[in-house]
Image (cartoon, rainbow, N blue to C red):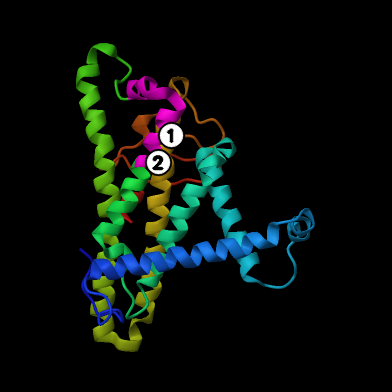
Amino acid sequence: MAASHFTYLDGLIDGKDNQALVAGLAIAGVLTLFGLLSKRKLVTNQQIDALVVPSGNVSAFGIADFVVECFLHFQDSILGRENRRYFPFMATLFFFLLFSNLLGLIPGTPAITASVSITVGFALASFAHFNYHGVREHGVWGYVKHFLGPVWWLAFLIFPLEIFSTLLRILTLNLRLYWNITADHIVLGALTDVLKIGAVPVYILGTFVSVIQAFVFTVLSMVYVLLATQHGDDSHGETDGHGKLESRNDLDGPDGASLVTSSHSAVGHVDKH
């Protein structure tokens, strides 16, 4: 159920969840259209060569190129350059959540990620994604062995705990995003009613929360993919210079959400933001 507040769609679409769905589709459409228009600039080798060195003029394409490149380098610090095949999914996840969160800060617009139906959908997509790649990397039986633990005679205890912990990620990914965004909107609404124009600093804080929540959700999705695809000889020891996690036990939050330091950046204990 979406957070209840006035939107300009109240007279057109019944139900906050339906409004969030329509707004989400609109965000997806705009991002897709922007991507297609940007792709037209990269059709020929001449166009690509011309864009290798950015021009001195600020453009939407140039800003998008810079932001996407920064995101790509950040993903490399966690998953490694050899795992760039995950970039389309992770980038889609991050930018859709980011713009959905930011849209909800505009008075009168639906709060997309304050709708459980939306946040559950994203949690399920992330869950399906890392499990799919885990099976693809190891095969069905090889992936199942990930849940049995290192000691065979304790497998009957570890296996159900690992399965429960993995399934719990759907709930925690959903609730973290939903409640943080919902709480943000409740605080913004209350302070705006009291402070009026003086609530501008609160909206700056709301923008920060929007970015952080998109960031946290995406980083956890990256970590889950890394855990699902790592091989047995990667389960212990030092990181490999690309920021890979040392073991499944490196996740120690309520849903296994504490991250370890990569070779270029550190991400830790994010589930409280």
Residue 139 at x, y = what percent? 41, 23
Look at the image and tell me whether residue 1 can be seen: yes
Q: Is residue 211 left or right of residue 62?
A: left
How packed mark 1 is, by other alpha carbons closer than 10 Å (few <14, some 14-19, many 20 or more), is some
Residue 105 at x, y = what percent? 36, 74
For the residues labelled 1 and 2, say whether their Cβ atoms are less than 8 Å apart.
Answer: yes
Which amino acid, by three-letter code, is at mark 2? Answer: His
- Please identify the quadrant where the N terminus is shown: bottom left
Q: Which residue is mark 2?
A: 129
Q: Is residue 43 left or right of residue 219?
A: right
Inter-mark Cα distance, 1 to 2: 6 Å
Residue 181 at x, y = what percent? 30, 64
Q: Which residue is mark 1?
A: 133
Front-lying residue, 157 or 270 = 157
- The structure residue drawn at horizontal position 24% and vertical position 17%, both measured from the top left corner, is 155
Q: Is residue 241 left or right of residue 4?
A: right
Looking at the image, is 28 positioned above or below residue 188? above
Which amino acid, by three-letter code, is at mark 1? Answer: His
Residue 246 at x, y = what percent? 44, 30
Looking at the image, is 203 positioned above or below residue 262? below
The magenta span reads: 128-146
**Residue sitting at the far bottom:** 197
